[in-house]
Image (cartoon, grey):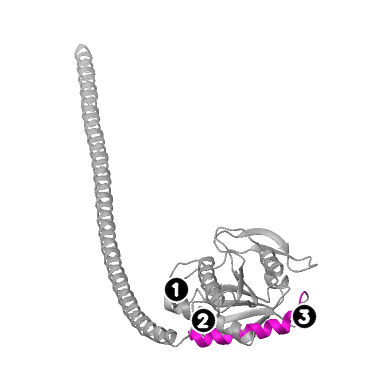
Amino acid sequence: MKELENGKKKLLITGMILIIIAVCTAGIFAYGSHKNNQKAAAKVQEESVQRASQEQSLAAQKEQEQKARSIAEAELQKALSEAQSRDESIAASEAESREQAQKEAEEASIAQEKAEQEAREEQERQAQGAGLAERLAGYETVSRPAGSTGDIICIDPGHQSRGNNGKEPEGPGSQTMKTKVAGGTGGVVSGVPEYQLTLTIGMMLMTELQNRGYTVVMTRESNDVDISNKERADIATAAGAAATIRIHADGVDSASASGASVLVPGSSNPYIPELAGSSSQLGSCIINSYCAATGMKNRGVVGSDNMTGINWSTNPVALLELGFMTNPTDDANMQDDTYQQLMVHGIADGIDAYFGR
């Protein structure tokens, strides 16, 4: 019995030992498995960290590469832009140089043409001067005894040094108001103002007519005056003039217009129609003789109804346009001393023809 109990105890002890061994073995196995799991987890985590680090590194590398590419592209674009700018600048400079060279060539050509033209004109003037002197030598100044009585001629040198923009009636009883004295034109070549040319010719004509026995009344003998067109006609009326010669010169925008003309009251002039016939005869005599003496183009006699100095006249009146100061040839001729003498002879011959002398 006792041996049975001892056998049971041994079995029990042996079972307990086996259980303990099994538990220990299971614990050891579980611990080992846990450790392995920890190691695996740690390894996974480490690999995950490594992958994340690698990915981060790759991302940083890609970002750096992108930045490098952007910088490279920007530098390339800048270089291309600078190269294009240089090319454009060089092209613009070359174009400017070509334009400048072309401009200088054109200016040189123009200067050469101008010099050649001036040389031709100078030759023409010299030839014309010789012809004018020869023509003037053929004139015989008509002289009459000093103190002889003759017809009274009023000479009105047009304009004055300063115009007068005040107003006066266009004619007797007219409601139309006109400028008292206009400024006039000027020489395109000579630069001489019309008022100076008309006074020069007027004073020379006065001397010539006096030498021919006429009594001469001048509306002005200097440029520094202020005499309106109506007042000039009044001077002729007060003097009892047999004829009024108004001296002017033409001027227009075109340099090609040339020649001389005479303005007189037309047949339909509302103020002095009774003077139309005699004034036309006076004007025809003057323009024909003037152009014959000077060789100036004859533009004929023109009727006028709106010129104050004509409309207030009480005696035959003719306004002679000596020539075009805006035409280089006319202007140069009219400033030539010899030509001016021919101008005066021609006007005086016309006046003689009108009075039958």
- The N terminus: image quadrant: top left
Task: Name the residue tied to disc 2.
Answer: 345
User: Which numbered disc, 3 or 2, marks the residue that appears first in the sequence?
Assistant: 3
Specify the principal SS of the magenta part.
helix
Residue placed most toward the observer, 124 or 155:
155
Alpha carbon distance from label 3 to label 2:
29 Å
Q: Image check: 47 left or right of 269?
A: left
Q: Residue at x 28, y 61 (%)?
A: 89
Foreground of the two, 252 or 59: 252
Q: Which mark is residue 274?
A: 3
What is the crowding at mark 3: few (fewer than 14 residues within 10 Å), some, or many (at least 20)? some
Residue 83 at x, y = what percent? 25, 59
Question: Does dot 3 land on a helix, a strand or a loop?
Answer: helix
Q: Which residue is mark 1?
A: 335
Q: If the image is split into quadrants, where does the C terminus sit?
A: bottom right
What's the amino acid at mark 1? Answer: Gln
10 Å crowding of disc 1: few (<14), some (14-19), many (20+):
some
**Contact (CB < 8 A) between labels 3 and 2?**
no
Identify which amino acid the numbered label 3 is placed on. Glu
> Is residue 257 in view?
no
Q: Position of residue 87 (x, y in %)?
A: 26, 63
Examine the rendered structure and indicate whether residue 116 appears above or below residue 83. Answer: below
Residue type for callout 2: His
Q: Which x, y percent locates residue 156?
A: 61, 70
Stretch of the chain drawn in magenta: 271-295
